[in-house]
Image: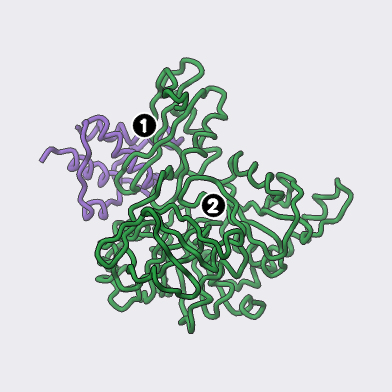
């Protein structure tokens, strides 16, 4: 799954929740109001698209501060080991 | 109580207030608004002659109305506006509770019930998913009264307004000397916990395992590690060994308890040996007049902290337990329908009922889907009354849910079957 595919999912959620689309990956998740619920929904939508459950590393999740971190995280999580 | 109202304090944002301050704040509001709003009935309003339900928007108002209600011996309930679905309103009306907008003083839903001084009605779906109004008093909610010489503590209060656990913590602040509360902010609970930790005053936390999992995941480990926490209580869901071990490692100086309680049975089991489950020997003992028994794998409790309808009775908790060696372990609920969304309880029947108030919805079914970070998210299957583009339908129904449900209860994934599934019993 490409980075732009993941960003498209995030932006679809943002639009559905009545918020502005993400234009700058450097924006902080708090700044754009991208919440834990949105993060979880993104994960489920990615799982739907790739047809399998994602595997997560708690340490990587803890470091997430920006949208770029979110994209990096999901890019990594979707890579088949 | 009057003395403690003046002495014990709590933080509302960065303001440190006494309970008496909060009481006064609401007293002014009630005196100004209540008689005027009832003028159409040509009568002044003696609050002690009604069953009252204060509908609140903020933690400060919720805490204020509890302090006011108890200090005036009212028959009252406090309910958060986001929980005010049509079925909740009906339940209050059917029980004779007049709902009052705690912000404006308007009567929202009048009812005529017989008041009982000092009754505190707790709205709960418990862990069963069924809406219930549970009658309590300060005595049955104040479960800390059996703790002797409670040390001075500053507690983080992470619970949802009006929940049984929330009331227990509020009673701790109202009735036990030297107990300070720092309420969490539900718009971002973990961030408010982080802020409370940074403030450096917290010494105690009452919470759920899910809360701690989120905190451990989200908060700087160094900040967590240097917090001078000496008392940790967990409950509300099954407390597993890994979370107990992790917290014991992080806070070796702390007393870590896990507490089994329900809004019907009251606080029943307190375990502080660092192990999950509870010792089987508790079934043979009478501790603080609390008795336990297991029948057909279900836990029954008889407790003086049970709600008043259940006092002196055995309460079927509906929780399944299994004995392994000299301990019992919790297995979950019998016939559970609740969805645990990051520690918040979302109830499919409530969400379905709200969805089906939309004119374009014929049928709705809400279930849980396992999700990272939050544990689970509600997902909806909806049969539409007319053909609508699925993306447009999702957006439309998301907005409909956001207008009437708490944000964690808004379904996150949707599908739109064309037929209502039906079994041979004619139930879906």
What tint does the image give chain B? Answer: green
On the picture, is B52 further left or further right than B174?
right
**Snapshot colouring:** by chain
- Specify the label residue A12 is tagged with: 1
Residue at figure coordinates x 40%, y 36% from the top left: B367
> Which image quarter: residue A39?
top left
Dot 1: chain letter: A
Q: In the rendered image of this protein, does residue B116 appear above or below residue B177?
A: above
Quadrant where the C terminus of chain B sits is top left
Residue at figure coordinates x 40%, y 39% from the top left: B378
Nearest the camera: B168 or B336?
B336
Q: In the rendered image of this protein, does residue A25 appear above or below residue A4?
A: below
Q: Which residue is mark 2?
A: B124
What distance separates the C-alpha of mark 1 from that of mark 2? 35 Å
Q: In the rendered image of this protein, does residue B111 appear above or below residue B411?
A: below
Residue at figure coordinates x 46%, y 39% from the top left: B348
Quadrant where the N terminus of chain B sits is bottom right
- The residue furthest bottom is B149
Residue B146 image point, x, y percent: 50, 77
- The residue furthest right is B42
- Badge 2, how many Cα within 10 Å: few under 14, some, many 20+? many
- Specify the label residue B275 is tagged with: none
């Amino acid at each position: 799954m490409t980075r732009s595919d993941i960003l498209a999912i995030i932006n679809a959620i943002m639009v559905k929740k009545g918020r502005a689309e993400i234009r700058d990956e450097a924006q902080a998740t708090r700044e754009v109001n991208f919440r834990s619920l949105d993060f979880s929904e993104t994960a489920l939508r990615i799982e739907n698209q790739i047809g399998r459950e994602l595997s997560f590393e708690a340490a990587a999740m803890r470091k997430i501060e920006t949208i770029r971190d979110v994209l990096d995280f999901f890019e990594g999580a979707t890579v088949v080991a | 109580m009057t003395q403690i109202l003046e002495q014990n304090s709590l933080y509302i944002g960065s303001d440190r207030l006494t309970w008496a301050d909060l009481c006064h704040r609401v007293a002014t509001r009630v005196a100004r608004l209540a008689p005027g709003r009832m003028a159409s009935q040509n009568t002044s309003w003696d609050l002690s002659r009604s069953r009252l339900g204060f509908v609140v928007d903020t933690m400060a108002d919720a805490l204020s109305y509890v302090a006011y209600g108890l200090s005036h011996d009212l028959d009252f309930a406090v309910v958060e506006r986001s929980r005010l679905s049509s079925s909740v309103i009906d339940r209050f009306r059917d029980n004779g509770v007049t709902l009052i907008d705690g912000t404006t003083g308007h009567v929202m839903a009048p009812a005529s019930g017989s008041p009982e001084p000092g009754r505190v009605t707790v709205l709960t779906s418990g862990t069963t998913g069924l809406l219930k109004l549970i009658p309590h008093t300060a005595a049955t909610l104040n479960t800390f009264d059996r703790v002797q010489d409670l040390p001075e503590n500053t507690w983080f209060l992470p619970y949802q307004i009006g929940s049984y656990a929330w009331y227990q913590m509020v009673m701790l602040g109202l009735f036990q000397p030297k107990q300070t509360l720092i309420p969490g902010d539900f718009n971002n609970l973990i961030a408010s916990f982080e802020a409370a930790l940074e403030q450096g005053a917290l010494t105690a936390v009452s919470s759920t395992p899910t809360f701690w999992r989120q905190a451990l995941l989200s908060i700087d480990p160094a900040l967590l590690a240097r917090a001078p926490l000496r008392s940790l209580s967990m409950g509300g869901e099954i407390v597993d060994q890994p979370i107990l071990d992790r917290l014991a490692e992080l806070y070796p100086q702390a007393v870590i308890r896990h507490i089994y309680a329900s809004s019907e049975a009251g606080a029943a089991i307190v375990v502080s040996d660092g192990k999950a489950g509870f010792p089987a020997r508790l079934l043979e003992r009478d501790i603080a007049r609390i008795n336990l028994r297991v029948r057909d794998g279900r836990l029954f409790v008889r407790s003086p902290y049970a709600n008043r309808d259940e006092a002196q009775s055995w309460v079927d908790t509906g929780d399944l337990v299994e004995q392994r060696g000299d301990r019992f372990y919790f297995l979950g609920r019998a016939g559970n329908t609740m969805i645990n969304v990051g520690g918040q309880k979302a109830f499919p029947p409530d969400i379905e009922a709200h969805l089906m108030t939309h004119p374009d919805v014929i049928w709705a079914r809400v279930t849980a889907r396992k999700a990272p970070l939050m544990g689970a998210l509600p997902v909806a299957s909806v049969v539409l009354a007319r053909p609508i583009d699925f993306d447009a339908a999702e957006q439309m129904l998301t907005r409909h849910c956001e207008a009437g449900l708490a944000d964690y209860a808004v379904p996150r994934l949707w599908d739109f079957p064309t037929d209502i599934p039906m079994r041979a019993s004619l139930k879906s």
